[in-house]
Image: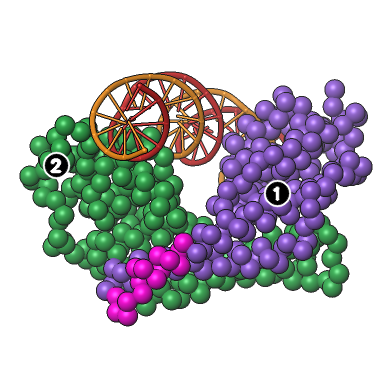
Chain colours: A green, B purple, C orange, D red
Amino acid sequence: MSTPHAILIALLEKPASGYDLARRFDRAIGFFWRATHQQIYRELGRMVEAGWVAVVEDEADAATRRKVYCVLAVGREEVVRWVRETPLGREDRNAFLLKLRADAVVGPLGLRDELLRLIDENRAQLVLYREIEQRDFGTPSLMRGQQLQYAILKAGIRAQEVWLEWAADVLPLLDGDSDVDIDVKRRCDPLRSAD
Amino acid sequence: MSTPHAILIALLEKPASGYDLARRFDRAIGFFWRATHQQIYRELGRMVEAGWVAVVEDEADAATRRKVYCVLAVGREEVVRWVRETPLGREDRNAFLLKLRADAVVGPLGLRDELLRLIDENRAQLVLYREIEQRDFGTPSLMRGQQLQYAILKAGIRAQEVWLEWAADVLPLLDGDSDVDIDVKRRCDPLRSAD
DNA sequence: AGGTACATGTAATCTGTTACATGATTCA
DNA sequence: TGAATCATGTAACAGATTACATGTACCT
């Protein structure tokens, strides 16, 4: 959905080098988001140009070419903007997980409304699936091809049901639309690390 | 994953025009596969060049520009080849559904082995998730941020569990590696419709 | 006459993937 | 000294998205 924002959020959780990010995208973040190191380096370059992130030279050993990136205030605001102003569709489940991750790291962003909307949309979709189920697979004996078609539909139905259960569990953790916590602790001082 | 093969399989189910396909990709097929009309027309053009599909002019009204596409023998063989020779990863669930769909329309293709492998890989992934769950979220009281992180992990765990249940249900419908049913009824005669 | 659905396409752009390339450090 | 890991990048290509463009058929 949005690789740069995925990277920003990962960097908000913990400043890192491109190489680190590539590995993190193969692990925890990568459970629902993928990015190759080429994508990461390209986006990091763009985001430096845009003033969203800054390079903090690794003081440990200046000899290495290792560059650690840190999100600046502008970048954090961009994340907030993206979370607030990018409406997701029913199918963008991973993007919603990403928004949750952003919410976890930059404070409550009022995701409740969007989740409620997604729940509605997914409920409607489930109803549609069930109608198809009744219509096409209500008969007692099905031939092989139809059984497989039914299995495909059932995959959709089960996924839908489980997502709705999950969403109901998550809902209480989210509050309504709220202001950003501006005083969130900055992990790196933008005034010192940039320019 | 593979737009051309998704289109081929859709055409095997029922010959259609580019326009029809675009709508079908917004409905049934689109539950797990997306394609815009531009993608579809481009791929149809390529597949005609490759000899995988042929245009059957709509005899109903020759006046319309409507072009109905039909899969040729070469195209059907290509589908079979793709299903057999394209190993999927744990995350390619939609691609596996597509293979199931192909299996439903061109006869048993021996998907059992691949499903068994995917089950193994997904089980291993679930074990990994559960380890993370124990390690990071085993403590009784979690702060807000951690609760959200946990919710994200739980989404992954639930999705994994449900997929495994589904896979166990599908397994009995699949047999081992087998030959293609060459004598499958052709919906359009390649010798008459092409060249 | 005007709007909607049908029907197909081109062009520009953006994103993602693959291949190639370089060089430092660490350990056996 | 040679292999693996760390670390960053360029270049070419393939795939997807968006905007633009055109014209017919049908209904009101």
Across and down, in percent, residue B37 comes to 61, 39
Along the line of sight, which residue is nearer the eye, B19 or A16?
A: A16
Q: Quadrant of residue A162?
A: bottom right
Q: Residues within 10 Å of mark 1 (few under 14, many from 20)?
A: many
SS state under label 1: helix
Q: Does A169 appear above or below A2?
A: below
Direction from residue B168 to residue A10 in the image, left or right: left
* Amino acid found under the numbered disc labelled 2: Ala
Q: Does A95 appear above or below C28?
A: below
Give the total of numbered labels. 2
* Amino acid found under the numbered disc labelled 1: Lys
Q: Residues within 10 Å of mark 2 (few under 14, many from 20)?
A: few
Task: Give the position of the N terminus of chain B as an image quadrant.
Answer: top right
Give the residue at x 45% y 64%.
Answer: B129
Q: What stretch is highlighted in magenta?
A: B128-142
Give the residue at x 86% y 69%.
Answer: A141
Q: Is residue B141 found inside the magenta-colored segment of the image? A: yes
Along the line of sight, which residue is nearer the eye, A159 or A182?
A: A159
Q: In which quarter of the image is residue A114?
A: bottom left
